[in-house]
Image (cartoon, rainbow, N blue to C red):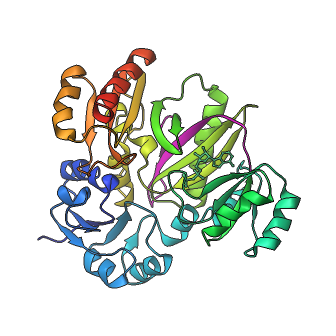
Amino acid sequence: MPAPHLAVIGGGQLARMMAPPAVALGIRLRLLAEAGDVSAAQVIGDHLVGDHTNLADLRDAVGDAPVVTFDHEHVPPEHLQALAAEGHACRPSPDALLFAQDKGDMRVRLSLLGIPSPVFELLSEDLADAIDDMHDFGYPAVVKTTRGGYDGKGVWVVRSADDLAEPFSVGQELMAEELVDFRRELSALVARSPSGEVRAYPVVESRQVDGVCSEVIAPAPDLDPALAAEARQIAERIATELEVTGILAVEMFETTDGRILVNELAMRPHNTGHWSIEGAETSQFENHLRAVLDLPLGPTTARQPWSVMVNVLGGAVEDLLVQRAIALAAEPGVHVHLYGKAVKPGRKVGHVTATGIDLDDTRARARRSAALLTDG
Ligand code: ADP
């Protein structure tokens, strides 16, 4: 195999979707995959199977690739520091990635920057002390693990001291946040390169069902232009201040009283940016590759007035490939993406995107296609 230009750690669908723009731009990818048949290993020929928490496996996979990037946030920071010390550019850098790995560190840093965020407090390790902390903080509140949460796992609404038992049973560091009264959730994506070029995508609305993203509308409908500009500026400022390289996704709340509060950060292509594959001039995956390799970034403007992305979650459909033909026949203009993953209930196994000039029609087409792939 010729030397890779870019090593990607983690073989999920985000790494898989980096492959098409890598092919187009002549970028040779090398993948560290959890197993030989995971989503990205099916499409990136140059892959090694190994464990991203094991430094030897990381070193084997990275080899002589000058740049390393990630499908997820779970590589231990000390391993990233070791790779960086050995001359590989980690993008994002370990220092930046920390703020996507640890919600407590992220909240502290953003509050120092004056970025609007929910009121928060780190909780004591001892349950009795934490009950005292919460007594002062006030109920109701949201309690979260500072690390390792995803898709709503590791997030609890607590209404009394009794409700602390469950979060404490997890045995991880916890924080409390005000229970935000929000109208909807927004997401602002930016791409930033090491030379400091920054491009922001249109701000989108994301809808969650049971803590999992189900639908994304680009741009966020009826968003006050001043709030949209604020959301965008917040994302650009975070990317610049934290020196993020690659895609930064900033998940936000639009509160019922018309404010923007930052919820959390991801430093990789993000589910709320999948619409950009067909809906934007340059997809988030292409701009992630361009950014981490310090190539000029592409325009982030929308190609159509509306794009609607709906996730395909594991449901009643057992054979996605049979159902794919039915979905394509029903909605030939909707773009179907399947991740090559086994169907399990609620698991993200694909997504669809429709674009168009009328929001209701665009959303109806996307939902119909996704429903055929999920429910049959
Ligand atoms: P995850 O890491 O699982 O994505 P989040 O911190 O994004 O965790 O929380 C998951 C969901 O819980 C959010 O999408 C939102 O709907 C809800 N949530 C999180 N924090 C708060 C909060 N402070 N107030 C109200 N709802 C919240």
Decide if residue 287 is in sight here. Answer: yes
Please give the count of numbered marks on the rendered protein.
0
Q: Quadrant of residue 96?
A: bottom right
46 with respect to 279 (left or right): left
Decide if residue 198 is in sight here. Answer: no
Q: Quadrant of residue 44?
A: bottom left
Q: The N terminus appears in which quarter of the rendering? A: bottom left
The structure residue drawn at horizontal position 52% and vertical position 39%, both measured from the top left corner, is 208
132 with respect to 81 (left or right): right
The structure residue drawn at horizontal position 75% and vertical position 67%, both measured from the top left corner, is 123
Which one is nearer the viewer's eye here, 44 or 169?
169
Which one is nearer the viewer's eye here, 139 or 61?
139
Measured along the vertical axis of the image, is residue 44 above or below residue 352?
Answer: below
Q: Is residue 342 magenta?
A: no
Residue 122 is situated, as x and y percent measured from the top left of the image, at: 74, 66
The structure residue drawn at horizontal position 33% and vertical position 75%, both measured from the top left corner, is 51
18 with respect to 126 (left or right): left
Q: Is residue 186 magenta?
A: yes
Q: The C terminus appears in which quarter of the rendering? A: top left
Give the residues drawn in magenta, as a range.
Answer: 178-203
Residue 43 is situated, as x and y percent measured from the top left of the image, at: 18, 55
Q: Residue furthest right?
A: 136
Residue 103 is situated, as x and y percent measured from the top left of the image, at: 62, 61
The structure residue drawn at horizontal position 82% and vertical position 72%, both measured from the top left corner, is 129
Q: Quadrant of residue 112?
A: bottom right
95 with respect to 67 (left or right): right
Q: Residue furthest left?
A: 1
